[in-house]
Image (cartoon, rainbow, N blue to C red):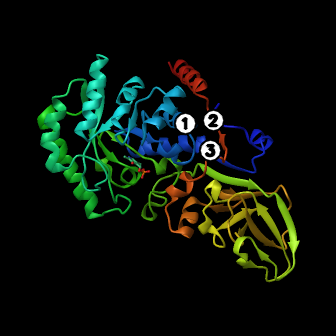
């Protein structure tokens, strides 16, 4: 439905592709729902579904029981609506006021934390004789965006007075939930509960309160509240080293490429930009058509490993914009062999966590930065229409 088959990808001349196992996404969502059985699950699909690709990932999450989706920007939500997604879509940051009317047209659920944006929404809603449900974002200590505790009473009075706005929910975001037992997480959660009480004093009971990201979903059950908002865990990635293997999650993405050159060079030859790698003995050098323009970080030069025919080999020399080299020694690797940069090959695995460790970043950044020019190949996709038919036939057969 949304991706290309691997054959089509190769016909179009791509030597690198990201395989995204939508079965793994569905499995992870089911697992996270079992961890938080009393809450709704909002699948966080911002950043092109952490690089895994929309709308395919969004559909997979909804098929597995996510009831809503979360994105950072209006444009990300429009992409999903234009693909036919009808579930509630939360937009985590306030867009420029000019897009207030767009949010109404596309039935999006805005985060609100400034009076100016709330006013734009109110004007757009009133002009169309409509009301828009919003979720108030409160700042409990991360200090990116959100209403500060000291400003909350005035802000709520102002919001209450605006026509066309229905406050459906309140939410906040944890700063260090990836470190289980951290006192700041507890403080944030306590403050959130106090701020919710304050809001409810002004406007009455809130339908939705939510705060839990993946880390909190996995490690802090009391924070599950009405909705959990896992992102990274839904992709089978760990929100932090302390939480590794805290649930049965499956990494959904593999990054693979086909070797496009292979040559035997004598000892003493040097490789790639900067001539930073020197062959200590005669050996075979293969070219992998992946570079930093594909999101394969230049910092991986000489440090990361790849899998070729089930065996680990080190990236040899500098990662270029579109290619890098690998010294495979005496292994008879031929043009056309598949290199796995992330994922499994036989019993060997390279995880996004491993690559993140090499360059001192987090797994989130590894997958999210895989460039748009790398085609996504979806495995185990259930097209949305089939899902509906399947759901109906299951219901009929169990009646
Ligand atoms: C508001 C909000 N909620 C939930 C998430 C999901 O976080 P994670 O990927 O750590 O589960 C994010 C991502 O940063 C976010 O910004």
- Residue 252 to residue 60: above or below: below
Quick one: SS at disc 1?
helix
Give the label on residue 21, or none.
3
Residue lying at the far front of the rendered structure: 98
Quick one: SS at disc 2?
loop
Quadrant of the image containing the N terminus: top right
| Residue name at image x 38 percent, y 49 percent | 213
Kindly tell me whether residue 208 is visible in this rendering: no
- Residue 155 to residue 107: above or below: below
Between marks 3 and 1, how big is the CA–CA gap? 10 Å
Give the label on residue 71, or none.
none
| Residues at discs 2 and 1 in contact (Cβ within 8 Å) | yes
| Residue name at image x 29 percent, y 47 percent | 172
- Looking at the image, is mark 2 or mark 3 earlier in the sequence? 3
- Looking at the image, is mark 3 or mark 1 earlier in the sequence? 3
Q: Is residue 204 left or right of residue 309?
A: left
Give the label on residue 60, or none.
1
| Residue name at image x 85 percent, y 64 percent | 262
Residue 307, percent from left and from top: 71, 63
Q: Is residue 68 left or right of residue 299?
A: left
Residue 232, percent from left and from top: 47, 51
For the residue pair 125 and 258, the one nearer the viewer reads as 125
- Looking at the image, is mark 2 or mark 1 earlier in the sequence? 1
Mark 3 crowd level (few <14, some 14–19, many ≥20, 10 Å Cα) = many
């Amino acid at each position: 439905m949304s991706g290309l088959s691997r054959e089509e990808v190769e016909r179009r001349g791509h030597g690198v592709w990201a395989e995204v196992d939508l079965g793994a996404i569905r499995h992870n969502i089911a697992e996270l729902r079992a961890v938080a059985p009393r809450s709704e699950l909002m699948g966080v699909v911002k950043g092109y579904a952490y690089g895994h690709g929309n709308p395919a990932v969004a559909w997979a999450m909804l098929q597995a029981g996510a009831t809503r989706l979360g994105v950072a920007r209006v444009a990300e939500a429009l992409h999903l609506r234009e693909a036919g997604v009808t579930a509630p879509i939360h937009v985590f940051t306030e867009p420029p006021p000019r897009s207030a009317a767009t949010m109404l047209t596309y039935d999006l659920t805005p985060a609100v934390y400034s009076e100016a944006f709330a006013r734009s929404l109110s004007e757009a809603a009133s002009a169309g004789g409509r009301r828009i449900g919003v979720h108030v974002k409160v700042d409990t200590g991360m200090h990116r965006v959100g209403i500060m505790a000291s400003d909350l009473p005035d802000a709520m009075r102002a919001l209450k007075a605006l026509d066309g706005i229905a406050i459906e929910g309140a939410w906040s975001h944890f700063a260090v939930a990836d470190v289980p037992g951290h006192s700041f997480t507890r403080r944030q959660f306590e403050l959130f509960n106090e701020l919710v009480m304050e809001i409810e004093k002004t406007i009455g009971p809130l339908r939705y309160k939510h705060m839990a990201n993946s880390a909190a979903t996995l490690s802090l059950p009391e924070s599950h509240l009405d909705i959990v908002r896992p992102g990274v865990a839904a992709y089978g990635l760990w929100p932090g080293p302390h939480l590794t293997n805290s649930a049965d999650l499956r990494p959904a993405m593999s990054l693979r490429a086909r070797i496009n050159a292979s040559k035997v060079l004598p000892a003493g030859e040097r490789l790639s930009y900067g001539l930073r790698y020197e062959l200590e003995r005669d050996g075979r050098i293969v070219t992998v058509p992946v570079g930093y323009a594909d999101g394969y970080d230049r910092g991986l030069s000489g440090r990361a490993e790849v899998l070729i025919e089930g065996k680990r080999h080190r990236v040899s020399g500098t990662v270029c914009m579109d290619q890098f080299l690998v010294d495979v020694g005496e292994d008879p690797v031929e043009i056309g062999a598949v290199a796995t940069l992330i994922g499994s090959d036989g019993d060997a695995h390279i995880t996004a966590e491993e690559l993140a460790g090499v360059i001192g970043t987090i797994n989130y950044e590894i997958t999210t930065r895989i460039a748009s020019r790398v085609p996504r190949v979806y495995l185990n996709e259930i097209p949305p229409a089939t899902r509906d038919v399947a759901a109906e036939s299951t219901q009929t057969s169990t009646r």
